[in-house]
Image (cartoon, rainbow, N blue to C red):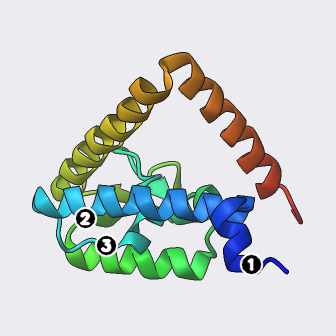
Amino acid sequence: MVTRAERNATDPDLGVLSGRLLFAVQRELFTTLAEQGFDDLKHRHGAVLAYLDPEGVRATDLSRLSGQHKQIVGTLIDELELLGYVERRPDPSDRRAKLICPTARGLAQMRAADAIMAAIQDRHARRLGHDEFKRFKRMLTDVTEHQRGFGS
């Protein structure tokens, strides 16, 4: 009988593969960010930072985009605010709502993270071939979005 560990070593399922990819990308991203002076960030902060826009984003949109519960996103925003990466500002289109906006440090981190992610993707595109990498991303996006629709 084949054990789960053996099966996942030779024929990993979608969850195992996506987890391995996520953890490997996070490890490179956050290690490189730390080397560039952003050593106070944790992997969990990526759920907010990945969807932050320079003009700000509502917390409810961050929750929807990241797939995280509102309470988790709220905690992450609190942490990032204490670390000096974001601030809450009134939403000009709805005074009752708040926008989560990057500070100068947050904008610097966003530029650094974008450059790191571009380098990671470029490395894989050169390794696989640019057309094959684009095809891979289209297929991965399709599978991801289809799976995210489960139960909603």
Residue 146 visible in the current orientation: yes
Separation (CA) of disc 2 from disc 3 = 5 Å
Report the residue marked by disc 2.
85
In the rendered image, the residue lying farthest to the right is: 151
Whether pointer 2 and pointer 1 mark residues with C-beta atoms closer than 8 Å, the reply is no
- Identity of the amino acid at label 3? Leu
Q: Residue 22: x percent and y percent?
A: 51, 60
Q: Which mark is residue 60?
A: none
Give me the residue at 63% from left, 66% from top: 9
> What is the crowding at mark 2: few (fewer than 14 residues within 10 Å), some, or many (at least 20)?
many
From the top left corner, tell me how far across and down residue 67 is, in percent. Answer: 65, 64
Identify which residue is drawn at 89% across, 66% down: 151
Q: Amino acid at mark 2?
A: Tyr
Reply above or below: 67 against 94: below
Residue 4 marker: 1
**Helix, strand or loop for disc 3:** helix
- What residue is disc 3 on? 80
Residue at the image position 54 percent from the left and 80 percent from the top? 72
List x then y, in percent, for residue 144.
72, 49
